[in-house]
Amino acid sequence: MTNVTRRGFLAASAAMAALPLLPARARAATAPLSLTATTRVIEVQGRAATVLGLLDTAGRPGLTLDPGQRFRTDLTNALDIETIVHWHGQIPPNDQDGVPNTNPMLQPGETRSYDFEARPGTFWMHSHIPEQEIGLLAAPLIVRRPEEAAEDRQEVVMLLHDFAFATPEEVLAKVTGGTAMDHGHMDHGAAPIPGMGGMEGMMSMPGMQAMHDAMAGGGAMAGGGAMTGGGAMDLNDYAFDAYLANDRTLADPEVVRVEKGGRVRLRVIDGASMTAFWIDTGAVLARLVAVDGAPVVPLSGTRFAISPGQRLDLEIDLPADGAVVPILALREGARERTGLMLAPQGAKVPKLAELSEKPHAAVSGDMAQETALRAVTPLAARPATAQPMVMLTGMMQPYQWRIDGRTWENRQPVEARSGERVEIMFHNMSMMAHPMHLHGHVFQVIAVNGTRFAGARRDTVSVPPMGSVTVALDAGAAAPWMLHCHHMGHLATGMMTEFRVRA
């Protein structure tokens, strides 16, 4: 899943043939691109596994668009089941968004055409049916900016998945039935707070807000950090059999051939159905330059947080001595890891274990990165005329997740008028983080746990356990846009509603 642009010196690299993303200019400008939802076979732990995929005409996952190129694509369903594909982070007309609330399902054998202006940046495409996303029906969608196309650097895409040999239906049944929990508790010296998971409808009770505020003061901290003293977070709902980077495990990682001393733009996509990761660049300093496709003021470091549905763009200056740079994705609260290798020709690629020596820290609840990010192009200053609060509630047993105490079937949409400035507070009253994704819009993070700042522009934000995140946006086209948690177990059991924009 790599694309070489640095002077073309590695154009024939066999290692990159498995998952490339080639420029779309090679196709006729007037012809639409083609995608097929189909099955494919990958190898995991020495076993062949049939999974789903979104492939181009050459059998490669996903699409890459040149600067200014429209998303003009024909999608064919070659599966024997119906599907629906969402263009995550793009803003198409609502009837092309790929969602089952407003778009008809794509039937077996059917081809559907899409045509809309593409937002530049790192995006992805995936089925909006939870079982199909668990089954790896997802792929990158890269839209280059003019300045990126002109830069003297190599592009590498890393798509992360969590993988199970069980069928997606079995995975979801075990998760939602509460029989497959891999809690990964991050317990900081205190027992879990009894009953704090299931609080549907309770925020309207007298004193409940004050109670939450008092607890949050000793729990999820303003400005960042994991919960301390307030209880134990639930991190992982399922022990997947493997964690994949570009369809491969760390036992047999993709080796991307790079140039000594060159520069790489690494586009990381968390396409996992239920897993947050740390992206670790080891001894090599990286610069975080974009999140969810939107440029940010560069943030330097060697470890970066990413939650399901989110994307990170990292600039990496490779060592002049030709040392191999492992790029690792560390599963939060556990020892599992995956990744790929950036390796100059002839360099000896190290063999890395698939388990770290000790469990990795929690991504959930650690908001230090989020509060440090600043948008290159923030929203224009305007007073908000609507300030809805969206309550996120749920529990592990019984496994139930809600928005404002409601499931999708009895949802109460969040209302707005087209063009108005809206500030949405996501208020999390559960012990799990929730990566909240809003369709059809880009928002700016403006507060975490009540502390305001001018943060990054995103389409998916992780809301910490027993904490809050406020985002600002200008309501877009009049339509019912989906708003949901991007953890597939949470979405499947009710954590989904609509952001209903009226004219």
Image: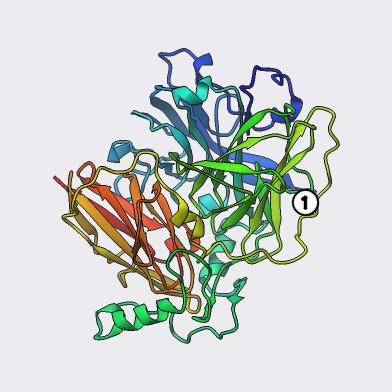
In terms of image quadrants, where is residue 353?
bottom right
Within 10 Å of disc 1 (Cα), the crowding (few <14, some 14-19, many 20+) is: few
**211 lies left or right of 294:** left
Q: Nearer the viewer, residue 233 or 126?
A: 233
Q: Nearer the viewer, residue 392 or 114?
A: 392
Residue occupying the point 57% across, 50% down: 135
Q: Which residue is mark 1?
A: 45
Residue occupying the point 33% across, 77% down: 200
Quarter of the figure with the C terminus: top left
Residue 70 rendering spot, x and y as whole percentages: 38, 24
**On screen, residue 470 above or below 457:** below
Residue occupying the point 45% across, 70% down: 221
Q: Nearer the viewer, residue 311 or 381?
A: 381
Quarter of the figure with the N terminus: top right
Residue occupying the point 51% across, 30% down: 63
**98 lies left or right of 303:** left
**On screen, residue 435 above or below 21:** below
**On screen, residue 401 above or below 263:** below
Residue 24 rendering spot, x and y as whole percentages: 51, 20
SS class of the residue under badge 1?
A: loop
Residue 306 rendering spot, x and y as whole percentages: 54, 53
What amino acid does circle 1 point to?
A: Gln
**On screen, residue 438 above or below 196:** above
**62 lies left or right of 246:** left
In terms of image quadrants, where is residue 385?
bottom left
